[in-house]
Image (cartoon, rainbow, N blue to C red):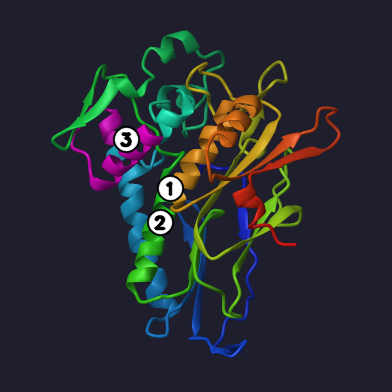
Amino acid sequence: MPKKPLRILPLVASLLLACACGGRTASPYVEVEGAMLGTTLRIVADLPGSSAGELYAAAMRLDAEAKASMSLFDEGSLLNRLNRGETDRVDRHIAFNLRLADSIGALSGGAYDVTVAPLVEAWGFAGKERCAAPNVDSLLAFVGRDKVRIEQGRLVREDPRVRLDFNSVAKGYTVDLLARLVDSLGAENYLVDIGGEVRCRGVNSRGTAWRVGIETPFDGNMTDGEYLRKRLLMRDGGLATSGNYRRFYRDAEGRKVAHTIDPLTGRSSLSRLLSATVWAPTCAEADALATMFLAMGADRALAAAASMPGAAVYFILAAADGDDYEEYLTPAMEAMVME
C-alpha cells in the first residue's frame, strides 16, 4: 500500500552484536531488511531467542494479512471488495481504522476523511488511470464520513458509490502491528520501519536512543538520506511524515497535482507546507495526523498544531521568498532534536 512520498530514515549502526555499553550488557540484536507493503522494511530488535529468518517470516505473514485486508492495489483485498459492494463484512483492521478516522476527522474540521477514494482514484493515485478533467463537484457528493458506518460488523453506506481509502493510515497501523509482533517475541528494545514510518522502544545496541532522520522536501528528492534536514532521538512511540514532493505529476497546463487530496475541495492540497512530521504514541495516529496537517495547508495546520497541547509536530515550509525553507517545531518535538 504505497502512499507517503517522504521517507524517515533510521540512522542505526549496521553492526548489531552483543556489546557492553556504559556498563550495560546488551542482548544480541537481530536485524532484518526486506520489502513489506510494496516498500522497504527494516527491523532491529534484541531477540536472543529468534533468528533473523524467523522474524522475517513472521513479518511476511503480517504483510500478507495487511494487504488482504486494506490494500487498494490488490483487487481481491477486503477493502476493494467492500468498495465494489461484493461484501459488507468488515474485519478488525478496517473497523479499527474507521474508528481512528473518526477521531482524527473530528480534529481536522473535515480535512481528514477516509471516504476520499473516488477523488483519489479520479486524480490517478489509486492504481487506476487518472481522469483528464475529474468532475470534482459530482464526486464530492460521495465523500463524507457521515455517509458510512459499521453496524454489527457490517459496513453500511448511504450510497453504493461511497468508497474507502486507508492509504493515509494503513502503513502506520501495520507498523504498530509489526511492533506488537516484535514485542510478543520478547524484545525489550526495537525499531521497526516500513517505508519510512517508524515505531520504536528502548535503545539501540549501543545503549542510546534510536536516531531518526527527516529528509529535506524538495521536488524530485528520491535519495535515501542524502539531504537530511533534522535528526531526532526516540525511545518510544511512532513517527510519520507526509509530503507532496515525490508522488505528484504535472497536468497539461504544467500545474502540479499531488497525491494528498483535500476532501473539502476535492483537489490537491498544495500550500507552502511541504512536509509534516508527527510523533504520537502509535504510528497509526502519527500517520493520520501527518496527512491531516498536510491536507489542511500551511495556515490551518499551524493554527491546529498550536491549539493541541503537548503535540509533537515538525513542519517544513517554503519560505515566503521561495528561496529557502522555514521550520515550525512544537516544544515537544524540539525536545527530540539532536544537538
Q: CA distance from mark 1 to mark 3?
A: 21 Å
- Residue 291 visible in this rendered orientation of the protein: yes
Q: Considering depth in this image, is 139 or 320 the residue closer to the camera? A: 320
Range of residues picked out in magenta: 80-103
| Within-10-Å neighbours for mark 2: few <14, some 14–19, many 20+ | many
118 over 319 or under it: above or below = above
Q: Considering depth in this image, is 165 or 169 the residue closer to the camera? A: 169
Q: Indicate the position of residue 107 as horizontal and vertical percent values.
A: 45, 31
**Residue under label 1:** 284
**Residue under label 2:** 176
Tags 1 and 3 touching, CB below 8 Å = no
Instruction: For mark 2, give the secondary structure.
Output: helix
| Within-10-Å neighbours for mark 3: few <14, some 14–19, many 20+ | many
Q: Indicate the position of residue 312 as horizontal and vertical percent values.
A: 57, 47
| Within-10-Å neighbours for mark 1: few <14, some 14–19, many 20+ | many
Tags 2 and 1 touching, CB below 8 Å = yes
Residue depicted at 57% across the width and 54% down the height: 196
Is residue 86 magenta-colored? Answer: yes
Q: For the N terminus, give its image quadrant.
A: top left
17 over 97 or under it: above or below = below
Q: For the C terminus, give its image quadrant.
A: bottom right
Between disc 2 and disc 1, whose residue precedes? 2
Q: Indicate the position of residue 176 as horizontal and vertical percent values.
A: 40, 56
Between disc 2 and disc 3, whose residue precedes? 3
- Residue 270 visible in this rendered orientation of the protein: no
144 over 191 or under it: above or below = above
Name which residue type carries label 2: Asp
Name which residue type carries label 1: Ala
Q: What secondary structure do most residues of the magenta stretch adopt?
A: helix
